[in-house]
Image (cartoon, rainbow, N blue to C red):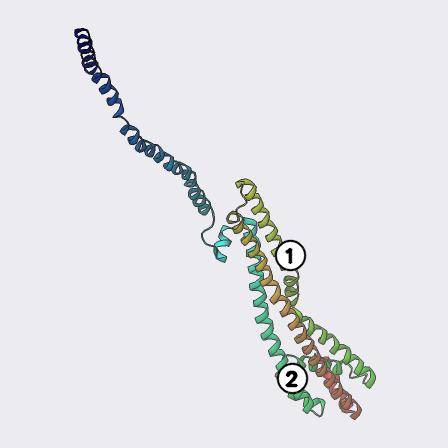
Amino acid sequence: MSRYSHRYHVAVAAVVAINLILPAPLFGQTTPAEPPPTPAASPPTTTQQVAPLASDPVPAAQPSTPQPSASTEVALKLPRDLSPWGMFMAADIVVKAVMVGLVFASVLTWTIWFAKAIELMIARRRMRAAIEALNQARSWSEAVARMKGRDYGPAALLRAADAELRLSADAMSPTGVKERIASRLERLEAAAGRSMIRGTGTLATIGATAPFVGLFGTVWGIMNSFIGISKSHTTNLAVVAPGIAEALLATALGLVAAIPAVVMYNVFSRWIAGYRALHADAAAEILRIVSRDLDRGAFNERPAERRRAIAAE
């Protein structure tokens, strides 16, 4: 019994000794077991690491910041005023010279229009009044009396015919006198036509050449635009558009000068043809009056007085 009792006591002592020894390792194992909260705290670290990842697009957006500056730089280089005057001031010197020439041509066209229109209207009105007066005259002396004090149109024709009658005082052949008077009247009619057509040649020149002059300015401006593209290494329309607009403005000015010039030239051609027809009617009326008086023998009544008048002149 004592042997078993001794073993029992030894076993109890061993268990007590083990219980005294084991708590230290257990506590050493529990202390590392407490850090599991640290892995739980690690997610904030992941969020902190994710935050820079989320902020990474910010540097990626930084290259977009120079784009506004580039567009601003391009905008500063472009002309701010795209009105006709602004485009003219920003144009090349050659394009400017073309535009100035076309504007001058347009002003000259309208000046010729007003001057020639007034001249033709006055001349046609006077010619109609003189023809009406000649139609009412029954003899040469009456026609001279009606045209007295006038120095234009049929009055010049009448003076030329009267001068030929005085020069032919000693050779009053009806056929010869009428031929010589008709020759003088034809020359006066041609001179009147040349006088009226003066200035219309300028309109024809402007109408024929102004579009091509404007086209030259357009070609020059577009060429400068392409040179600007090659220098700027960009095909942005904002860089090319101002030069092309300036070039097209030259073409527009060419058309503005040419179209009215062509229309005015055609109008004047019709008016001058009508004026020549009136001049021919006046000459025909004078020839009829001379023919009547020749048949009447009115110019043979006082040939001596006519000779003295010729000698006095």
Label 2, label 1: how far apart the Cα atoms are? 42 Å
Q: Which mark is residue 212?
A: 1
Contact, CB < 8 Å: mark 2 with mark 1? no
Q: Residues within 10 Å of mark 1 (few under 14, many from 20)?
A: some
Amino acid type of the residue tagged 2 in the rendering:
Arg
Q: Where is residue 112? Give x, y as percent.
A: 59, 68
Quadrant the N terminus occupies = top left
Return the x and y of residue 147 as percentages of the image width and height.
65, 85
- Who's the residue at 45% across and 54% down the image? 81
Q: Quadrant of residue 151?
A: bottom right
Q: Nearer the viewer, residue 295 or 163?
A: 295
Q: Could you tell me which secondary element the residue under label 1 belongs to?
A: helix
Percent coordinates x, y for residue 224 in the rendering: 57, 46
Element type where label 2 sits in the image: helix
State left or right for residue 110 relative to residue 161.
Answer: left
Q: Is residue 234 left or right of residue 141?
A: left
Q: Identify residue type, mark 1.
A: Phe
Left or right position of 225 against 173: left
**Mark drawn on residue 128:** 2
Find residue 34 and report its horizontal and vertical position in percent.
25, 26
Which residue is at the front of the view, 53 or 211? 53
Q: Residue furthest top?
A: 3
- Tell me which residue sits at (74%, 78%) in the image: 185
